[in-house]
Image (cartoon, helix red, strand yellow):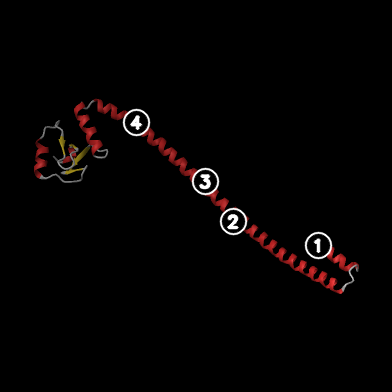
């Protein structure tokens, strides 16, 4: 567009065009080209400003992404460490359970495992202050008397949740 405007201006300045009508048309075309060039330059400036704004925003977002990624990496590291700790504890508890289960009669262990599956992972509950810690329901006086009269090595179960009741010296019986 600039080259065309320069070429038209050179034709106008050279005096090669003598017709007043052609001169007037050439002058209008040069003015039109100048206006069009100004409009395009304004568009270019607007695009450059928008580009600069977009680059600033991209830089800001990149910083935020880096910050979030850092937090993700930190959380992932903490999660992995917790998994390792949990796996270690699970291994230890599994070994301890094997040792303890070897000393428990097979039929009692079978009952416990069956109840544990049925009751969502808890097959035995502590009897504490007349209350079953499994279902949190207080035993009535009849049930409590049955528990009191049962031999120390007898398997006693809660009438409500059917878990094995573990009697301790803290049970108050």
The spot of residue 80 in percent (x, y) is: 44, 38
Residue linked to disc 3: 70
Left or right of 87, for residue 107: left
Left or right of 10, for residue 148: left
Query: Which tag, 3 or 4, sits closer to the chain's start?
Result: 3
Point out the frontmost of discs 4 and 2. Answer: 2
Question: Distance between the Cα atoms at labels 3 and 4?
Answer: 33 Å
Query: Which tag, 1 or 4, sits closer to the chain's start?
Result: 1
Question: Distance between the Cα atoms at labels 3 and 2?
Answer: 20 Å
Q: Are marks 3 and 4 in contact (CB under 8 Å)?
A: no
Residue linked to disc 2: 57
Q: Quarter of the image for the N terminus: give it.
A: bottom right
Query: Which tag, 3 or 2, sits closer to the chain's start?
Result: 2
Residue linked to disc 1: 4
Left or right of 68, for residue 136: left
The spot of residue 41 in percent (x, y) is: 72, 63
Instruction: Mark 4: give few (<14), some (14-19) or many (20+) Cα within 10 Å.
Output: few
Q: Tag 3, which secondary structure?
A: helix
Disc number at residue 53?
none
Point out the frontmost of discs 1 and 2. Answer: 1
- At a point 43% along the width and 38% down the height, the residue shown is 81
Residue linked to disc 4: 92
Point out the frontmost of discs 3 and 1. Answer: 1
Q: Are marks 1 and 4 in contact (CB under 8 Å)?
A: no
Point out the frontmost of discs 3 and 2. Answer: 2
Q: Quarter of the image for the C terminus: give it.
A: top left
Q: Tag 2, which secondary structure?
A: helix
Point out the frontmost of discs 1 and 4. Answer: 1
């Amino acid at each position: 567009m600039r080259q065309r405007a320069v070429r038209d201006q050179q034709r106008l300045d050279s005096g090669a065009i003598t017709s007043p009508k052609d001169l007037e048309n050439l002058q209008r075309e040069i003015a039109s080209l100048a206006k069009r060039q100004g409009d395009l330059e304004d568009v270019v400036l607007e695009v450059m400003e928008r580009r600069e704004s977009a680059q600033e925003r991209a830089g800001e977002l990149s910083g935020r992404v880096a910050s979030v990624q850092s937090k993700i990496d930190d959380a992932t590291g903490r999660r992995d460490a917790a998994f390792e700790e949990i796996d270690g504890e699970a291994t230890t508890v599994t070994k301890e359970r094997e040792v303890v289960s070897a000393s428990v009669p097979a039929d009692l262990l079978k009952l416990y495992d069956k109840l544990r599956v049925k009751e969502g992972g808890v097959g035995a509950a502590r009897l504490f202050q007349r209350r079953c810690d499994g279902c949190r329901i207080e035993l009535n006086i009849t049930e409590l008397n049955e528990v009191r009269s049962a031999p120390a090595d007898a398997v006693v179960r809660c009438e409500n949740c059917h878990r094995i009741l573990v009697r301790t010296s803290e049970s108050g019986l």
